Amino acid sequence: EVQLVESGGGLVKPGESLRLSCAASGFTFNDAWMSWVRQAPGKGLDWVGRIRSKTDGGTTDYAAPVKGRFTISRDDSKNTLYLQMNSLKTEDTAVYYCATDGGSNWGQGTLVTVSS
Amino acid sequence: QSALTQPASVSGSPGQSITISCTGTSSDVGAYNHVSWFQQHPGKAPKLMIFDVSNRPSGVSDRFSGSKSGNTASLTISGLQAEDEADYYCNSYTTSSTRVFGGGTKLTVL
């Protein structure tokens, strides 16, 4: 059974940093392209970014609002995906989901609140 | 990249069919056959219902179907059931190698 479990969410102040993790199991993680998607309270889904598999270059793509502030990485030895979020803004407040890039599998999400 | 355009809400009675549209541009919906549809119930993670315009993942009811014409994709749900009441989002790959979601459509089963 495929499982994606996010962790690391919490309350931070504007300008601070936070790192989210996503532990994967039940599939060949190192072959998977992985994405982060967020959802602000009461709002729609918002694509954050993606990381390709190492065999496909391990490169990343980001949505414009987070480019330069967020970094996606992976540790295939730990079957774990990461989202490093720097210079956080109040508008980054959302539930953050990790998902396989095509959207077949999603985690339960972790809430990030950016507030002073 | 602007969000794809979906109607804010649609409704239908049990047994009826409804269609949700998703309008983008030649840089996303119109560029590739990589349009997906997701269903999301309140408080739950999204669920993939359609991928690559018209393909259903294993386990998804054949009451759900997808199509595309030009820059507009569509999701049709036939034989509406109470459990279909949810939010639906389209998603497309873009020419910038990113993905973009639609604003979401709330489906109400009357």
Image (cartoon, coloured by chain):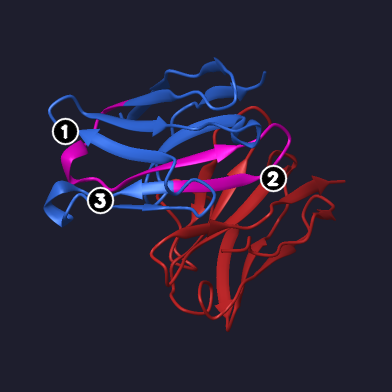
The x, y position of residue A61, in whole percent, is: 36, 54
Q: Which residue is mark 3?
A: A52
Say which quarter of the image contains residue A3.
Answer: top left
Q: Is residue B80 magenta?
A: no
- Highlighted magenta segment, given as a residue range: A23-48
Query: Do marks 2 and 3 both belong to one polypeptide chain?
Result: no
Left or right, residue B14 beside residue A17: right
Q: Which residue is mark 1?
A: A76
Colour assignment, chain A: blue
Query: Do marks 1 and 2 both belong to one polypeptide chain?
Result: no
User: According to the colouring, which chain is red?
Assistant: B
Give the amino acid type for the residue marked by disc 1 in the picture: Asp
The x, y position of residue B4, in whole percent, is: 64, 64
* Residues at marks 3 and 1, CA–CA distance in whole angstroms: 12 Å
The x, y position of residue A106, in whole percent, is: 44, 36
Q: Which residue is mark 2?
A: B87
Crowding around mark 3 (Cα neighbors within 10 Å: few <14, some 14 to 19, many 20+) is: many
